[in-house]
Amino acid sequence: MLLGFVVAVVLLFVASGMAVWHMKAWRQAQGTLHAQEQVFAAKQYRRRLRTAGLLAVLAILIAVGQVIPPSILALCYWFGVTLLVLWVALLGVADVLLSHRHYDELSRNNLVQQAVLRAEIDRLKREAAARPAPPADTNGAHG
């Protein structure tokens, strides 16, 4: 029973810390991101804040569950808590997958931009090599 309360308190602190951390990160990112990044960051912020909130709810449910006497009601209660734990895990997996997809897309876009810039550099180098060299100054004096 004591272990359950300890787990609940630790989970509540973790959830609170996550929420505060995400809020600070969101405030710092405001106005510094491009439009596409802003949309992704807003969705990520909502996902992560929702997950932190659900972890806080889980902490409370775990604490309350410690005082429920063993019965069929307690079994149903813990089954519900287990479903909520699975839901939080799925939210975490979804966040990882969405973040991975987003950063893969950014990486692909950067590679395309890099290829375009390299092609432009190569073109400029070819143009510079094709230009005739300026005539050499034979007097040694500038006019």
Image: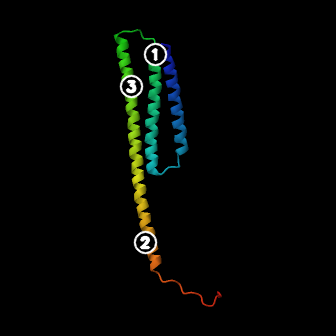
Residue at 44 percent of width and 28 percent of height: 54
Determine the secondary structure under disc 3. helix
Q: Amino acid at mark 3?
A: Leu
Q: Which residue is mark 3?
A: 84
Above or below: residue 4 compared with residue 18: above
Distance in Å between CA atoms under marks 1 and 2: 70 Å
Circles 3 and 2 in contact, beta carbons < 8 Å: no
Question: Which of labels 3 and 2 is toward the front?
Answer: 2
Image quarter for residue 100? top left
Circles 1 and 2 in contact, beta carbons < 8 Å: no
Determine the secondary structure under disc 1. helix
Most extreme residue toward the bottom is 139
Above or below: residue 125 compared with residue 43: below
Q: Which residue is mark 2?
A: 123
Q: Position of residue 110 (x, y in %)?
A: 43, 56
Image quarter for residue 72? top left
Q: Which residue is mark 1?
A: 64
